[in-house]
Amino acid sequence: MKYIDEFRDPAAARVLLAQIQTISTRPVQFMEFCGGHTHAIFEFGLRQMLPETVRLSSGPGCPVCVTSMSDLALAFDLLEQSGVILTTFGDMMRVPGPNGSLLEARSRGADVRMVYSPLDALSLARETPDREVVFLGVGFETTAPTVAATLLQAEAEALPNFYVLSLHKLTIAAIRAILAAGEVTLDGVIGPGHVAAIIGADAWGLLPDEYGIPCAISGFEPLDMLRAIKSLVEMAEEGAPAVINTYGRVVSAEGNRHAQQAMSRVFTVGSADWRGFGTLPDSGLHIRREYAHRDARVVFALKARTFVEPKGCRCGDVLRGTATPLDCALFGRACTPASPVGPCMVSSEGACSAYYQYGAGDNDV
Amino acid sequence: MSDERILLAHGSGGQLSHELVSRVFLGRFGNDTLNALGDSALLDLPNDGSRLALTTDSFVVSPLFFRGGSIGKLAICGTVNDLAVAGAKPLYLSAGFILEEGLPYEVLERVVDDMARMAAQSGVQIVTGDTKVVNHGAADGLFINTAGVGIVPLGRELSPQRLRVGDVLLINGTVGDHGIAVMLERENLGLRSELASDCAPLNGLIAEVLEACGDAVHCMRDATRGGLVATLNEWAESGACCLQVEETAIPVREDVRAACELLGLSPYYAANEGKVVIAVAPEAADAALRTIQAHELGRNAAIIGQVVEGKAGRVLLRTSLGARRLLDMIVGDQLPRIC
């Protein structure tokens, strides 16, 4: 833990904050892409420590949140099939679906199991040869490689009863959609460190090259984020946008080649449905035809249906950065962690959950 | 909604547990004693002004044996601690067993051995009991219920209503040990550590604090399910006060922190089975800390915060960077994150 403490040192944080204060002369608006950053920012109380000129807004980087209701419905459809065990990361369990959450489905007798890794789902498939084990593949480029590797392991073992429902999404497509829509004005983007560890810092080059916006790839500790923010302020002040990698201990320019290879062996890029964005081309990972026998969509003949998002829920606007959770009339009233309306209130990476849990916007805190 | 069902999260000590208690039980059973929702019910005795403390708790932990304890050890310590934090001297316990058909005799005997050992260590006797056997599959090995009684001496009053601005909050050691230790064993995560549950009877330590600080001790609670955060929020709510704790002051073991970082959990919400949060008047804080630290179950004790001016019902955390934020209860169990 010494390793983490050196990135949480309060004295070093104060130095960085003072430097940011000194170099920041005009108001800037940065978006932290990743929901993990949003939560870390509130957990450490960074927003209130920054000078007033530096504003942060949360972005679409919450895989649970951007999963559309129609995609989520596919998972519930699987539970109707006899013999299926649905395995998922814990974060999906409480998300409101078309008819309650997976937790509620489990309380009605559905076989939903929480796993810590797709490999746990694979073990379950080995142990229960008479059941069909489906892993619910929700996540960005951070999770897709391990799911791909797990599927390849199932192939290597010729394990007949392991499948994946791939709802994986690509981060670059989301940031491109936000910037192309022009609904928000951004002076910089805090780039997602874990995603960049896989796809490489260079993948974020489109921000300076196509949109003239600086990007600083950041880790998740206070000093990581302050260094990234300082880089963004410097680039914004100088009018010299670039991609700066402030998370060099984890992220390289080209990313993790092995992970990329596993992903491209198993998945092909195609369109995907996003909450808040609708259908975006080249934004999702579909299982390649040669592994169709592992693709839960194919094997269980899942049919996509259209769902209307819950009335009044502004998760979509929050994910696009056009609204903050506090702009939503449901926030903290009809929508709380105990009775969530939208996924942003339940996911540990959701912006509404961070605002609620840490008391953001509450003057008494 | 008519389709509502009981979720596992209703038993986690978070907001859903509270909702369940107030909606289903308080509405139907409600009376002044129960409504106080203390760790023990305090009942007036007819003679000398001392009061009877009565408490009950059920134990359903999986696995039955874990590093640092067992379901049997928990069943005694949990009830002894609930009596002790109410200011009572624990005296007598009942023990009810629900056994699953097929449970090895040897397992039951090991559990009961642990119970006997803990009862002796904490100075209580198990004076009545019950046993039921259910079909295979209807229970996870065995479940235990214990109830306990103790005596609260005349004039002793420990409750959140006694919290005052300026009161100092102490804890007798590191938080999250039990919750994370059991999770690591249950989920078989392949993380190696020396971490053990902190399960222990606290009545000895608590008696010494009460001896040293007397009436300056305003409130105590063992921070079990829902962890430190649940205890602090219950106090802020029922004591109608605002609490502030210092992140840098809360003791957390290195391996607990590391496991929590890895899984995206917080040790402040993880269960403890041998930790008591104590609120004392400011002038008694030093004496309380010295007394706790002198006890073997309090070596890592620390002053973690204070009752402060502020909106009633709030618990605030001052982060290591000096920012203030809410330290709110969570809805159900902590769930590990995706990435």
Image: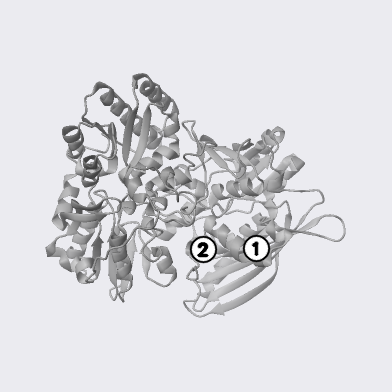
Residue B85, given in percent of the width and then of the height, sits at 68, 51
Height in image: A365 above or below A100? above
Disc nearest the viewer among 1 and 2: 1
> Callout 1: helix, strand or loop?
helix
Where, by quadrant of the figure, is residue A29 drawn? top left
Task: Please tell me which residue is depicted at 23% across the width and 40% down the height of the picture.
Answer: A179
- The chain ID associated with circle 1 is B
Q: Nearer the viewer, residue B143 or A262?
A: A262
Residue B125, given in percent of the width and then of the height, sits at 71, 64
Question: Looking at the image, is mark 1 or mark 2 earlier in the sequence?
Answer: 1
Q: Which residue is mark 1?
A: B26
Residue B91, given in percent of the width and then of the height, sits at 73, 60
Spatial distance from mark 1 to mark 2, Cα to Cα? Answer: 26 Å
| Residue B176 visible in this rendered orientation of the protein | no
Which quarter shows the N terminus of chain A?
Answer: top left
Residue B126, given in percent of the width and then of the height, sits at 69, 66
In the image, A259: left or right of A356? left
In the image, A327: left or right of A272? right
Categorize mark 2 by other alpha carbons within 10 Å: few (<14), some (14-19), many (20+).
many
| Residue A23 visible in this rendered orientation of the protein | yes
Q: Which residue is mark 2?
A: B61
